[in-house]
Amino acid sequence: MSVLSHAMDVGALTPFLWGFEEREKLMEFYERVSGARLHAAYVRPGGVHQDLPVGLLDDIYQWATQFGDRIDETEELLTDNRIWIARTKGVGVVSAAEAINYSFTGVMLRGSGVAWDIRKSAPYDAYGQVDFDVPVGQAGDCYDRYLCRMEEFRQSLRIIHQCLNKMPPGPIRVEDYKISPPPRVAMKENMEALIHHFLLYTKGYAVPPGETYSAIEAPKGEMGVFVVSDGSERPYRCKIRAPGFAHLGSFDQISRGHLLADAVAIIGTMDLVFGEVDR
């Protein structure tokens, strides 16, 4: 939705409406898996909440097959549109050195020519088992960042198709009841499973003393969590590193010398969620 919301802010309404139609299909997939549309809470310590519904993978494959045409239609409206080019090309230019100095991540960094993607640089989950390219820009302006995001749509489709083809059967959670809640059937038959369930939901599980920082490549940039443990069931400190705060912090420098109307294009290309920034 970042590209489409950006286009609407600049004045192109049609791509936004097309995108909302596709977004609704994705939200339906979320709901079928977890029961929730936005905050899925599907990934849990030790695995995932439940297995995938029957037929979901086929529906995802069908959606991914047709979504490429929607990307092409959006590009036909925007990429060579003279108004879109005038509003984004040469606007919000950030060099590679400046992007690194501003602590940019995600498309804000790659649009300036720095090929940094955590999924490639430090693969996690199954990203080391799939092939995809990291698109980078050259000019470091709003237009290049738009092109990067459009290409990332196509790379995401490559990843989805590979994951669908390689999805293995098997258990969805570890069977260590000290970490992962036991199934309801076991709770009705085994007192020990019931005790584990009670302890997990009232206290949690103790984590050895220490500290760690883990990050993933989120759609908006690097999303990291720094956690400090004192050995108890509750974290001593938990710091969330969201990408939007660093991006918005550079707005003053990036927007200098531009028109007031360009502020909309610059903020749109940052793909900000102000609830994330103002925590």
Image (cartoon, helix red, strand yellow):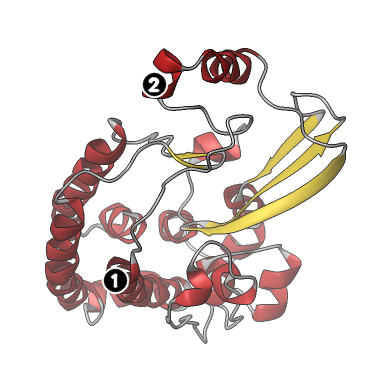
Horizontal and vertical percent position of residue 252 = 64, 55
The quadrant of the rendering that contains the N terminus is: bottom left
Q: Is residue 93 visible?
A: no
Read off the residue under disc 1: 157
Q: Position of residue 204 (x, y in %)?
A: 66, 22
Residue closest to the far bottom: 138
Q: Is residue 172 left or right of residue 101?
A: left
Amino acid at pointer 2? Arg
What residue is drawn where x is 25% and y is 72%? 83
The crowd level at tag 1 (other Cα within 10 Å; few <14, some 14-19, many 20+) is: some
Whichever of callouts 2 and 1 sits on the residue coming sooner in the sequence is 1
Nearer the observer, 125 or 47:
47
SS at mark 2?
A: helix
Q: Please, is residue 98 above or below residue 33 in the view?
A: below
Q: 179 or 220, which is in the foreground?
A: 179
Which of these two is toward me, 186 or 26? 186
Instruction: Compare residues 48 and 138 and report the one nearer the observer.
Output: 48
Task: Count the numbered circles shown.
Answer: 2
Question: Does residue 17 appear in the picture of this structure?
Answer: yes
Residue beneath the point at 43% across and 23% down: 186
Separation of marks 2 and 1 at Cα, in angstroms: 36 Å
Q: Identity of the amino acid at label 1?
A: Leu
What residue is pinned by disc 2?
A: 184
When asked about the image quadrant of residue 205, the answer is top right
- The structure residue drawn at horizontal position 48% and vertical position 49%, both measured from the top left corner, is 272
Q: Quick check: 198 left or right of 60?
A: right
Residue 134 screen position, x and y as percent: 48, 80
